[in-house]
Every structure is written in C-alpha cells, then in structure tokens.
Image (cartoon, coloured by chain):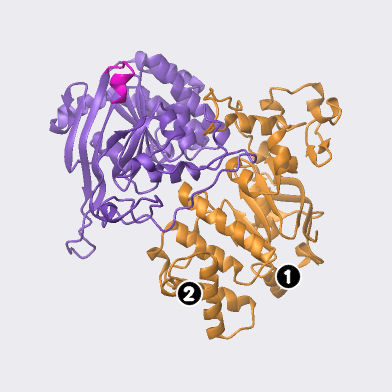
Chain colours: A purple, B orange
Amino acid sequence: MGAEHSGMTQLLEVRELVKHYSSGGLFGGAERPVRAVDGVSFEVGRGETLALVGESGCGKSSVGRTILRLQEPTAGRFVFDGTDVFALDRSALRRLRRRMQIIFQDPYSSLNPRMTVGKAVAEGIEIHGLARGPEVGRRVAGLLEEVGLDPGYARRYPHEFSGGQRQRIGIARALAVEPSFIVCDEPVSALDVSVQAQVLNLLADLQRDRGLSYLFIAHDLAVVRQIARRVAVMYLGRIVETGPTEALLASPRHPYTVALLSAVPEPDPTRRRSRIVLGGDLPSPSNPPPGCPFHTRCFHPARNERCRTEVPALRPVGATVVACHYAETTPAPSTGAEARI
Amino acid sequence: MTRVLDVRDLHVSFPTSNGRRFHPVDGVSFSLDRGETLALVGESGCGKSLTSLALLRLIPPPGRVDPGSIIRLGDTDVLALEGEALRQVRGRRIGMIFQDPMTSLNPVFTVGDQIAEGVRAHLPVSKAEARARALGLLQEVGIPDPSGRLNAYPHQLSGGMRQRVMIAIALSAEPEILVADEPTTALDVTVQAQILEVLDQLRRARGMAVLLITHDLGIVAGRADRVAVMYAGQIVEEAPTAELFARPSHPYTQGLFASVPRITGPVQRLTPIGGTVPPATAWPAGCRFRPRCPQAFEKSELPPELLPVGPTHRMRCWLAERNGGR
C-alpha cells in the first residue's frame, strides 16, 4: 500500500503475523491462549516510518518483538530485504540482527548498570566485528556526539544520566551496528515533554541522515503525527484501520479510531471537541468477542447483528483501509476541529 | 467564592550528606476556592508532587516542611496539627488520589471492604451503612455492575476501574478538597477521558475543590479553571486557563508549548527547550531558568518575583517589567 504509493522501495513486509501466548494456567490447566497478535500485515519502505498505535494490550509491542524474533512467532511471514526472517537459523539470525535494532520505552532497564556507557555502545560493534582496537573508541565517541551526548560520557555509568540522556544512549547503542531498520517501542512515552521533543527531533534527524526505516510503536496520536506519515491503528491484536496519517486523522473511518482521536487531550481550551467517551473495558485478548472485536464498545449507529458474528475484513474506504462493515457511514467526530490541514 | 485552602511561602527541604539542606519546593503560594480546579503543571523534579504531599503533611522524613511555611485549610492551621486532629484532615477534609492505583489498594481485601473502611475511618456509621455508602460511591464514580464489583478484588479490575475505586475511597469521607496527583498518567487515553469526566462531574455535583497535578498541558486545557506552572521548586507563571493558553508569557511556559506535538494544525519541527532541568541540590542563582532561557538578559542574574503580566496573570520573569506589564 503506502510504500509503493509514495514511490519508496519496500524494505520489509509482514504477512498475517500471529503471536499467541499459551498461558497454560498456573496449575498446568489448558487455558485459552492470549491472542496478542491475530493476523497483522504491513510493509515499511526504505527511509519510511510506519506508526503502530493503540492502547495497552492491543498487541503493538508484541508485533515489534516478534518480528525481531525476540520471541518466536506463532504463525506468519516476515520478509526483510528479501530474507525470510522466520526461516533463519540462529547464526543467520544473529548476522541479520545487525540490520534490525530496537529501542525501548525505558532504556535504563535495557542497559547493564555495571557497564560504562562506552562499553554498552561498543558491545554491538565488537560482537559484529565492525571495528577493532582504537577505532572502536573513535566510533563510540562519534555515535555519542551524533545523539547529542558529550563523548566524555563514555566513561560514566547509566545511573548518572537522566531519562532523556539514557534514551539517547539507547539510540547510540542501536545505531552502533549500522542498522537499516529500528523498532522504536514507545521511545518517548516516559519522557517529560521538553525532553520528548528533543528525542523526536533526534529520531527525525537520524532518519534523514542515515536513511533509516522505523516501526514506531506508540499510544499517543499527536506524537505519531509528528514522526510518521503512515499509521496503523491496532485493537485487540488486529489492525482496524491504516493509511496516511493526515488522512486517517482528518477522516477516521473506524469507530475505534474516532474514539481514540477524540480522547487526545489537546492543549487548546478554545477547541472544545465533542469527546466520545467509550463505555466499558477492553475485552480480554484471551477471550476476544466474536465478529468485530470492537462491537462490544462500538457506538456506530448502524451496528447490528452482523457486527456480532462476522469479522470485518480490511478494505479501502476513502483514503484509508479499514475493518468495519459500515465504514462508509461512520459518523465524523462532530468537532470544532475542522481546522485540520 | 469561599476560600478553602491557602498556601503561603511553602518550603520543603531535605538534608544533604554534608549537613546542609536543599529545597525542592522553594516558596510556593497558591489558594483554592470551593468548586474550583487549580492545575499545578510542570515536569519531573519541579516540586509539584512534594507540594501536594506537604498539604497532607506526608513529606517523608528526613524531609520537612520548613518553618515559616503556611498551609491554612479554612480556619485550620494544618502545620500545627498533631495526632487525631491531623488524621481528621488527611482523608477527611483533603482526599488524595495517585498515579498508580494498584500500589494504593490492598490486594487481599475486596473493593467494598476498602471503601467501607474509608467511610468508617472518618464517619460515625454502622458497618451496614458503610457498605451501603460504598455501593453508592461505586455508582457515583461510574463503575458498571456496582453491587457485583463490591466483592471484587483489586486484581480483578482494569487500571481504569481501579482508579475509579481510588476516587471512591478518596471521596468516602466527603472531603472539601481532592488532590489528584497525575491521576491518569498510567492510563490509556480513552480511559483517561473517562476518569477526567468522572472527576469533573464529582467536582460539580459536590462543589469540591480539585488540585490537579499533571505534566500534561492537554489535560489542563479541558479541565482546570486556573493554572500554575512550576519550574525548579517555584511557581513561574499563573493565570486563568484560557488566559495562560492564549498568552503563555514565561519563556519556560512558551518552551513547553513549543515542545508539545499537536493533533491539528501544520506539522512543524518541534522546538525543544535546550538542556535539562537542574537538580534541586543545585538550583541556579538568579532566575532559575536563565541557563536554558533563550531570552535571558542582564537582569536575569537577579532572582525575579512573580510580576504582573495582566490583571489576572503573573510570571516570575523580569521581562514582565520590560514589557510594561502589558
């Protein structure tokens, strides 16, 4: 879809990805598996950012971790630059990992507290044999500078740094192996707004300078709009709507996207939007509702028996691709927010 | 308007290893009227949460509220209270909810028991009456199937439902003031919208005053009557919400606004504030924002007071003087 339209060449393609966690039950009873990811497909172009957006438990982080094989997929296919990643053996996978990296929401938990920043950044360079001897130190210094840190920080330990600085260290560490693709898993969610802006700008600059592709996993639509031209909205393990970010925000077709958008707190008291406050809770992913996964909370006036029985397929409606039987008549959020570009 | 809370020149300090004290809250003054929502906005380390803990005298030792600080709750001098009298303020007159409801709920008691306990701690009612009130509170905070949920344990509820239970407990003694410290930060946006809606309804229905502590300007825009922006232990700008959002005047407030990604309008590169928040052990001399301020000038070397920017609008910046108070 999007990658071809924008004239970009495709870097990776995910098809019908499934990830179930068998809970097994505390006492070995055969419980229903948690269907964290339930048939997700997308592609990302070279130098492109695709945002995966959704709320806790929608499966967005599982998608990122499963395609990197930090956990094994239940089913599906992932082709990265011509390579079938899920078919690789351990050593081939290790070699490919150099090209696919991940940065996390909390970089502190992913940094070894006893390892200096310099060692942490150098680790990947040494494992993959990208440089030797004094050249390693020079590369580390260059990377720290590139992410906006003083090269002298290489001798310090992670606990000496603020959240924003740690995130920069995490980014330097990911960049050290010269990847072409980075999964950014909620990389700015734990940061204060002024620091969040610094890190978002850094990610945009690195993408421009290095031609990186990002899968940007987030829950905040305003952040997504800042960083990604294309977005996929997930609900209960499935993509329910995807398309160009501006089109999706301007005329959302899935009722869940409408609700998500209306819930974004906007720093502008003059723009009083009508809020759609969703009723009820997210259903359990181990026992998702039959039919449309959103039907238990849907407010679409046309919702009916069909929604409770028949799973809607993703299909193009207007400018986005959407999984709703009645996407043509989804009520627009009645807003003062017509001042969209 | 009835004034319910008056905080004057609040200082909170902690000792350092070399015997000196540093001041994470350093001269904060504000007031709350009945039925009003005041938002204290700021980033990590600005002192907003310690300010709220000080109201309930919950500053953990060796930290302390420094002599000379004033916290008046109606006619009560909160800082002079001891023992039972202090307990009558905590929970009874000032209710509090925190970011993470799971750590504040007891996992081995049912939701109904915990709310009823809150009721009986402060009001002279029978167990049955407390139970009935618990049911009413669950209804009031919008929990579906409230009588069923009375017997639920905290782990059986979602994050949003747990936060509603916390609100119910905070309301159980019918406080005059509700302090909400980042009440929706741990929640998803659609759930956040639900919780903020509940808080707003309760404030209106009960005429309660709300002190909303948050880092999120978006939440403030829809919910607060007045805003106080905190930086480095001080209030640096305060105004009615519409005024502050229309004319953010302190360079720090302006920096915050320029840092926030928007859901509407043209997508532009964000303009972050350079540098990082200084630690409370080393507040800069003069204007505390000076090292990061793009508009700093000679006079910024002196510490500014809160100066008028307009009839209802003040900021802690010498530019207010220079611009003639607009």
Please name the residue shown 68% across and 62% down the image: B208
Q: Which mark is residue A82?
A: none
How far, Cα to Cα, is label 2 from label 1? Answer: 30 Å
Upstream in the sequence, badge 2 or badge 1?
1
Callout 2, which amino acid?
A: Gly
Q: Is residue B143 left or right of residue A307?
A: right
Q: How many marks?
A: 2
Please name the residue shown 27% across and 38% down the image: A314
Residue neighbourhood size for the residue with mark 2, other residues' Cα within 10 Å, grouped as few (<14), some (14–19), many (≥20): many
Question: Which chain does the residue under circle 1 lie in?
Answer: B
- Circle 1 — which element? loop
Instruction: State yes or no: residue A8 in magenta.
Output: yes
Q: Is residue A140 above or below residue B185?
A: above
Please name the residue shown 64% across and 45% down the image: B17
Q: Position of residue A93 (x, y in %)?
A: 19, 29
Question: Which chain does the residue under circle 2 lie in?
Answer: B
Q: Which residue is mark 1?
A: B82
Q: Which residue is mark 2?
A: B112
Callout 1, which amino acid?
A: Glu
Q: Is residue A185 above or below residue A37?
A: above
Q: Is residue B102 at least partly visible in the picture?
A: no
Residue neighbourhood size for the residue with mark 1, other residues' Cα within 10 Å, grouped as few (<14), some (14–19), many (≥20): few
Which of A65 and A116 lies nearest the eye of the viewer? A65
Rendering quarter of residue A247: top left
Q: Is residue B304 at least partly visible in the picture?
A: yes
Residue stretch rendered in magenta on the structure: A1-9
